[in-house]
Image (tube, grey):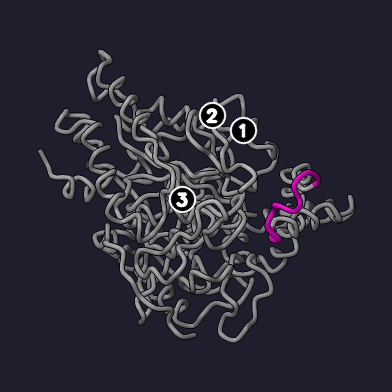
């Protein structure tokens, strides 16, 4: 039998293959993950809540059932982590808030139920900022999560615990969520892979903003094939989410068997939405040119997104007003300022403000469709700067341009959120001081299969997935 160290170094795809042929059991993988968590968790604080007995009970049920291992669903008994914004029955779920510090739900969210039905075994909850609002992962319940590449730095937010846990080898697959870049940003900072699917691809079910396409659930992993596998386990229609889509006729993992290279790619250093640090631009520009090795034409081009910030701030305000206004009335003194600010911004909006933003978003989408009539992909940096001081809420400046709010550092990702297109962050390099940089690749609307194919081909060229997992590394904050 492989050792614990050998097991945690497997990709999720490799681990599932061993589960399906009976070479390893779910219980053995649970033990391997727990052993790794015990070693690295004190340095990074990524998975503050564990549920080993619940996981072992689930594993035993799978092993006692009559169907052979290959019929246990997409994940076949693989341990996974769920972000601490999503309910898991019988497991402490705090939403990163002291208001819910002792909350233990009795019913799992629809996505968790789907993943468990598809052979996923929930082993841990990953850390997140309070109610998922923040570009750095910390809260009053569990404290800060640190970046395994340099523990003096942030892992990003709000799916920071998920990204850090993956990079450090604590888990094979981690669930994330993404509104303005909460899944893609941490993936970039931690040199892992994070996919924001198209709205409806993964059913949400339990959220209040059921009719909004801004916030989605999605897969995170160390490799693109692992993300594709996890997306297969997540996707599917669910009556609890009116926007949810049926699964594709061909699975996403199967689509990677014979990938078709993209033919024409639009590259943008900044999407026209804000400053990007020079070294980040240079690394991502060189990465974009790697697609030429696949025979693609790469040229500087992007849809017109200059009004993305104006649109997003209005629609985000509406989102927070729907989500948090009742809680603000009851618990204002226990909610962090970022959430109060976002919510009050939404409550101050007029009907005319919202109507104007919706009209502008429709026009933006028309421009996006026009762009994708000419290009297969849009490629740009995922974050304008690499990981910053873990003690900061957000980077204070980008190449001398002061940032007023934490949302300002997410312009590259929230602009893409407005397009409703699937987008993936894939590791593409490191700065001179060793900080990870992610490339954001954007596909056509509902074009996850082609997007994953392109990302997988890029990953093979870059080879950075082979660096993971890593042991957490202490370090210092690089000078600006």
Q: Closer to the observer: label 3 or label 1?
A: 1
Relative to 312, 47 lies left or right: left
What residue sits right under mark 1 in the picture? 206
Q: Crowding near pointer 1: few (<14 within 10 Å), some, many (20+)?
A: some
Q: Rounded to the nearest whole Å, what is the CA distance between mark 3 and mark 1?
A: 21 Å
Residue 238 place in picture, x, y as percent: 56, 26
- The secondary structure that most of the magenta stretch takes on is helix
- Tell me, yes or no, whether the two marked residues, 3 and 2, touch with CB atoms within 8 Å: no
Residue 195 - label: 3
Q: Which of marks 3 and 2 is nearer the N terminus?
A: 2
Relative to 109, 73 lies left or right: left
Q: Earlier in the sequence, mark 1 or mark 2?
A: 2
Q: Earlier in the sequence, mark 3 or mark 1?
A: 3
Quick one: 447 or 237, which is closer to the camera? 237
The image quarter in which residue 276 lies: bottom right
**Residue range highlighted in magenta:** 329-338
Quick one: 238 or 372, which is closer to the camera? 238
Q: Which residue lies furthest to the left in this view?
A: 1
The image quarter in which residue 79 lies: top left
Residue 110 - label: 2
- Tell me, yes or no, whether the two marked residues, 1 and 2, touch with CB atoms within 8 Å: yes
């Amino acid at each position: 039998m492989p050792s614990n160290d050998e097991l945690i170094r497997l990709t999720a795809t490799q681990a599932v293959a061993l589960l399906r042929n009976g070479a390893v059991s779910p219980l053995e993988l649970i033990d391997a993950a727990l052993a790794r968590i015990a070693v690295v968790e004190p340095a990074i604080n990524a998975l503050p809540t564990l549920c080993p007995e619940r996981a072992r009970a689930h594993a035993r049920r799978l092993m006692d059932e009559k169907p052979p291992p290959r019929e246990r669903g997409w994940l076949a008994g693989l341990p996974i982590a769920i972000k601490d914004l999503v309910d898991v029955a019988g497991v402490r779920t705090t939403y990163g808030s002291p208001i819910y510090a002792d909350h233990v739900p009795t019913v799992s969210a629809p996505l968790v139920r789907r993943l468990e039905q598809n052979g996923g075994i929930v082993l841990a909850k990953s850390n997140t900022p309070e109610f998922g609002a923040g570009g750095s992962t910390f809260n009053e319940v569990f404290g800060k999560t640190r970046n395994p590449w340099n523990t003096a730095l942030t892992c990003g937010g709000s799916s920071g615990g998920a990204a850090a846990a993956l990079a450090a080898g604590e888990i094979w697959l981690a669930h994330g969520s993404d509104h303005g870049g909460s899944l893609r940003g941490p993936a970039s900072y931690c040199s892992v892979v994070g996919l924001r699917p198209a709205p409806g691809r993964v059913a949400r079910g339990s959220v209040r903003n059921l009719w909004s396409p801004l916030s989605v659930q999605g897969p995170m992993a160390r490799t693109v094939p692992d993300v594709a596998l996890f997306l297969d386990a997540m996707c599917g229609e669910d009556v609890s989410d009116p926007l949810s889509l049926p699964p594709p006729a061909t699975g996403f993992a199967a689509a990677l068997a014979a990938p078709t290279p993209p033919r024409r790619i639009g590259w943008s250093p900044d999407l026209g939405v804000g400053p990007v640090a020079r070294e980040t631009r240079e690394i991502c520009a060189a990465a974009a040119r790697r697609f030429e090795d696949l025979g693609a034409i790469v040229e500087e081009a992007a849809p017109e997104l200059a009004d993305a910030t104006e649109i997003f701030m209005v629609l985000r305000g509406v989102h927070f007003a729907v989500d948090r206004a009742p809680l603000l009335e009851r618990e204002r003194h226990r909610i962090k300022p970022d959430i109060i600010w976002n919510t009050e911004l939404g409550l101050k909006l007029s009907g005319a403000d919202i109507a104007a933003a919706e009209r502008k978003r429709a026009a933006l989408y028309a421009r996006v469709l026009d762009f994708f009539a000419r290009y297969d992909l849009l490629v740009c940096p995922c974050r304008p700067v690499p990981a910053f001081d873990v003690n900061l809420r957000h980077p204070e400046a980008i190449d001398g341009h002061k940032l007023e709010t934490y949302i300002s550092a997410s312009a590259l990702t929230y602009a893409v959120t407005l397009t409703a297109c699937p987008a993936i962050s894939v590791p593409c390099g490191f700065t001179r001081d060793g900080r990870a940089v992610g490339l954001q690749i954007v596909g056509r609307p509902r074009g996850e299969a082609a997007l994953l194919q392109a990302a997988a081909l890029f990953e093979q060229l870059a080879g950075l997935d082979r660096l993971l997992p890593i042991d957490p590394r202490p370090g210092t904050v690089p000078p600006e």
